[in-house]
Structure formats: structure tokens, C-alpha cells
């Protein structure tokens, strides 16, 4: 029996991780700690919410006393930490909340784990989920490896870089057993429609302008979210303590090319005329400090743990577009904010 604390489990990636663990390991108790910010939505987990091996706890990771209480109440022996403020554009507007959640929240969890486990490290693990954005921006060539120096540019990536450093500091200073993974851009179901792919699918459906930053020439390396969740499962069980693993799809796309694929896919599935939505493309002012290119080398994860992405991008994007078209109600609830008040009433608030 393991009691695993997953933080940020009501968010995009966290909900996929929770679903995978709850279904695959009935012998584990998965405790989902989430404060339900605008990005956290318990509807993402409707299909597992009644499982015996799943518990939701509403708690802010920065609230150290309550975090400690959760460790005690549920006898937590492992942590998979995903809770974060995650959107670069928001971090440019409000860097304080990113420092608070991503740095202080991570520190609060590390300190709670250290105190509760009290230097009995056997069968304990603190797994920190991070991003490739900590490595900064690539030029036309090269890939991020686990040895690439940190060079964050946005308040989001700076706060994630800082949290990674704290995790390593706890490993080195106290021997707290940790592992970190740094992943490229994810796409798939249940992603909040402020990020490129769900935002643009929703706008194409509703014939709204598609705001392409700059010239649309920035490059991202896209990974299907289920493949990220599978990598997290593997690293959690087989990763080397104190180590770092890069996770990526070897799947680079220039934004504008990806946008054209989304337009073609939505138009085809909605039986619109070919290229009908191309006119929605609207070039807008570039994002400040916009990183040109991210691309991950995940060879280490493949060679050491045997992980590879399972899905080709064409299949992944088709599945993703179909999911958003079939889940208009989810999208309407999220964009209207309705989901928040409903779920606040349904679940006990800790503290
Ligand atoms: P998300 O924004 O969809 O979800 C974040 C979740 O954390 C939400 O459920 C939110 O309610 C919760 N949360 C935020 N602040 C909290 C707090 N103070 N206390 C408790 N819960 C809080 O994010 P995501 O895209 O699912 O990303 C999850 C993690 O993966 C993050 O750490 C992110 O940095 C990392 N990551 C994301 C990507 C990506 O492409 N989305 C890629 C690599 C790494
Ligand atoms: P995003 O999904 O915000 O992820 P990240 O910035 O963390 O990589 O953005 C992906 C790319 O799409 C990035 O280069 C910025 C660009 N973008 C736009 O051109 N327009 C938009 O409205 C958004 C949200 C993103």
C-alpha cells in the first residue's frame, strides 16, 4: 500500500496522472491536493471521483500548516508535485503569484515531506514535475539535454527553475529522495483554453480570430499528455533517486504550421469547406521575451527506462480536436467559469 500525494491533480496534466494511477494501481491511495484555481477543474476527474483509492483534498500548497496536516492525516509516503501557475502570458502580467505558488509552494511541500518523513527515507520519494522552459531558448539547431544549463527568460520559467533548484537543494542537503523531470509542451484533452491548442480549436469552432504572436515562427516540441503521464509513472517507479529526466516527443512544430494543421482538422471534422477558417489567422504583437525554440532530447529516458512516445502527432492532434468538438459542454463551463462555484459547494474545504 502506498499513499501518494499528487498536487495539482485537478489541472490538465495532473488529471491525466491521477486517472492513470487510480486505474492502474488499485492498491495505491491517490490523494489529490489542489486549491482549484481558475485552471483546476474537478470535472476533469469525474470518471474516477468515486473510486475507493481516490481522495480529493482542497488545499493550497503554500499553506504549510494544512499541507503538514494532509501528510499526517493520509500518511503520505510519496509526492508527485504538479501544482503550479503554468501560463507564461499570465506570469508576464503577475509574476508575484508565480513566485508564490511555484517557489514558495514547492518549498512548503518539501519542508512538510522532510518534517513528516523525519529522515526515514526508505520507500519515500518526492517527484517534482517541471518544464523544458527552464533551459531557455534554442537557436535553429540543438536540443535540450539534462546537462543543458538553466537559462530561464519568463517569470514562469524563472519560478520553475527556482523550484527545481530547491528540490535539488533538499536532495543534497538533507538526502530527501527526489527525482525531477522536465517535459516539453503537452497537448490533449482537459487543457485550459488559454494555451495555444485548446484556445485555437475553440476559436476556430466559434469563428473567432486566431491571435498568432509575432510571425508565428516560434517552435515548440509537442507531446501527447497521456505519454507524459506514462513517463511520470515510469520515472516515479524506476527513476534513479536524485536524477533528472527530460521528456519530449521529438516532434517540433513552427506555431504557424501547427495552426494550419488545426484549422484543416477542425474544418474537415465540421464539414466546412477546405481552408474556410484560414482567414481567422491574425498576426498580433509578439509576446515579451518570447522564447524562439524549445526541443527536448529524451534519449536518456529511452535508453535507461525504455520510454518512447506512443502516439504519432497526426493521430494525437486528430484525437485532441475530436475530444474538444465532442466536449463542447466542458469547454462552455470552463470558458464561462461555471465549473468553479458548482464544485466549491460539492467538496469540503480544508482549513
Ligand atoms: P494547469 O495550470 O492546467 O494546472 C495546475 C493545477 O495546479 C490546477 O489544478 C490548479 O488549481 C493547481 N494549483 C495552482 N496553484 C495551486 C496552489 N497554490 N495549491 C494547490 N494547487 C494549485 O497546469 P498543467 O499544464 O497541468 O501543468 C502541471 C505541471 O506540469 C506544472 O508544474 C507545469 O509547470 C508542468 N509542465 C506543464 C507543461 C505543459 O505543457 N502544460 C509542460 C511541462 C511541464
Ligand atoms: P503556450 O501554449 O502558451 O505554451 P508556451 O508558451 O509555454 O510554450 O504557447 C505555445 C506557443 O504559441 C508559444 O510560442 C506562444 C504561441 N501563442 C500564440 O501565438 N498565440 C496565443 O494566443 C498563445 C496562447 C500562444
Image (cartoon, rainbow, N blue to C red):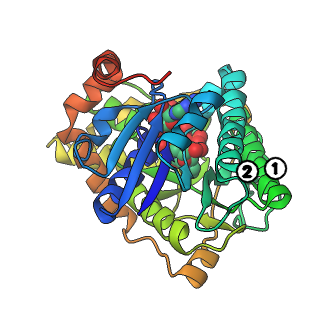
Report the disc number at residue 151: 1
Q: Residue at x 63, y 61 (%)?
A: 295
Report the disc number at residue 226: none
Task: List x then y, in percent, for residue 214.
Answer: 62, 35
* Secondary structure state at the residue bearing disc 1: loop
Q: Which residue is nearer to you in this view: 62 or 201?
A: 62
Q: Nearer the viewer, mark 1 or mark 2?
A: 2
Asked which quadrant contains residue 90, the reply is top right
Task: List x then y, in percent, for residue 93.
Answer: 66, 20
- Decide: few, some or many residues near mark 1? Use Cα within 10 Å; few <14, some 14-19, many ≥20: some
Q: Quadrant of the N terminus?
A: bottom left
- Decide: few, some or many residues near mark 2? Use Cα within 10 Å; few <14, some 14-19, many ≥20: many
Asked which quadrant contains residue 191, the reply is top left
- Which quarter of the frame holds ligand 2? top right
Task: List x then y, in percent, for residue 323.
Answer: 24, 46
Residue designated by label 2: 164
Which of the marked residues, 1 or 2, is nearer the chain's N terminus?
1
Image height check: is 128 above or below 194? Answer: below
* Secondary structure state at the residue bearing disc 2: helix
In this picture, residue 46 sits left or right of residue 133: left
Badges 1 and 2: C-beta atoms under 8 Å apart? Answer: no
Task: List x then y, in percent, for residue 104.
Answer: 72, 33
Q: Residue at x 63, y 29 (%)?
A: 65
Q: Residue at x 41, y 54 (%)?
A: 17
Image height check: is 27 above or below 284? Answer: below
Q: CA distance from mark 1 to mark 2?
A: 13 Å
- The answer to whether one can see residue 82 in this image is yes
Q: Residue at x 63, y 64 (%)?
A: 296
In this picture, residue 80 sits left or right of residue 28: right
Q: Which residue is nearer to you in this view: 144 or 142?
A: 144
Amino acid at each position: 500500500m502506498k499513499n501518494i500525494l499528487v498536487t495539482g491533480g485537478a489541472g490538465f496534466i495532473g488529471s491525466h496522472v491521477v486517472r492513470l494511477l487510480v486505474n492502474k494501481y488499485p492498491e495505491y491511495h491517490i490523494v489529490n491536493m489542489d486549491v482549484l484555481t481558475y485552471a483546476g477543474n474537478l470535472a476533469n476527474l469525474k470518471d474516477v471521483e468515486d473510486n475507493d483509492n481516490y481522495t480529493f483534498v482542497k488545499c493550497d500548497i503554500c499553506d504549510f500548516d494544512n499541507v503538514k496536516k494532509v501528510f499526517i492525516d493520509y500518511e503520505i509516503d510519496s509526492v508527485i508535485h504538479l501544482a503550479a501557475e503554468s501560463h507564461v502570458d499570465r506570469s508576464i502580467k503577475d509574476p508575484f503569484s508565480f513566485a508564490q505558488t511555484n517557489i514558495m509552494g514547492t518549498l512548503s511541500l518539501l519542508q512538510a515531506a522532510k518534517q513528516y518523513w523525519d529522515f526515514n527515507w526508505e520507500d519515500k520519494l518526492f517527484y517534482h514535475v517541471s518544464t523544458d522552459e527552464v533551459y531557455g531558448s534554442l537557436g535553429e539547431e540543438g536540443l535540450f539535454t539534462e546537462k543543458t544549463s538553466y537559462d530561464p527568460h519568463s517569470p514562469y520559467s524563472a519560478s520553475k527553475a527556482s523550484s527545481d533548484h530547491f528540490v535539488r537543494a533538499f536532495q543534497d542537503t538533507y538526502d530527501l529522495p527526489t527525482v525531477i523531470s522536465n517535459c516539453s509542451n503537452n497537448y490533449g484533452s482537459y487543457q485550459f483554453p488559454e494555451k495555444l491548442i485548446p484556445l485555437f480549436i475553440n476559436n476556430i469552432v466559434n469563428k473567432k480570430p486566431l491571435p498568432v504572436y509575432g510571425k508565428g515562427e516560434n517552435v515548440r516540441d509537442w507531446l501527447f499528455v497521456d505519454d507524459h503521464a506514462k513517463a511520470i509513472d515510469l520515472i516515479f517507479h524506476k527513476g534513479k533517486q536524485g536524477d533528472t529526466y527530460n521528456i519530449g516527443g521529438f516532434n517540433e512544430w513552427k506555431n504557424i504550421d501547427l495552426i494550419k494543421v488545426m484549422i484543416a482538422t477542425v474544418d474537415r471534422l465540421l464539414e466546412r469547406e477546405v481552408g474556410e477558417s484560414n482567414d481567422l489567422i491574425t498576426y498580433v504583437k509578439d509576446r515579451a521575451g518570447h522564447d524562439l525554440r524549445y526541443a527536448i532530447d529524451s534519449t536518456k529516458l529511452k535508453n535507461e527506462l525504455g520510454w518512447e512516445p506512443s502516439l504519432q502527432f497526426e493521430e494525437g492532434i486528430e484525437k485532441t480536436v475530436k475530444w474538444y468538438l465532442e466536449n463542447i459542454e466542458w469547454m462552455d463551463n470552463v470558458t464561462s467559469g461555471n465549473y468553479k462555484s458548482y464544485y466549491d459547494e460539492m467538496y469540503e474545504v480544508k482549513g
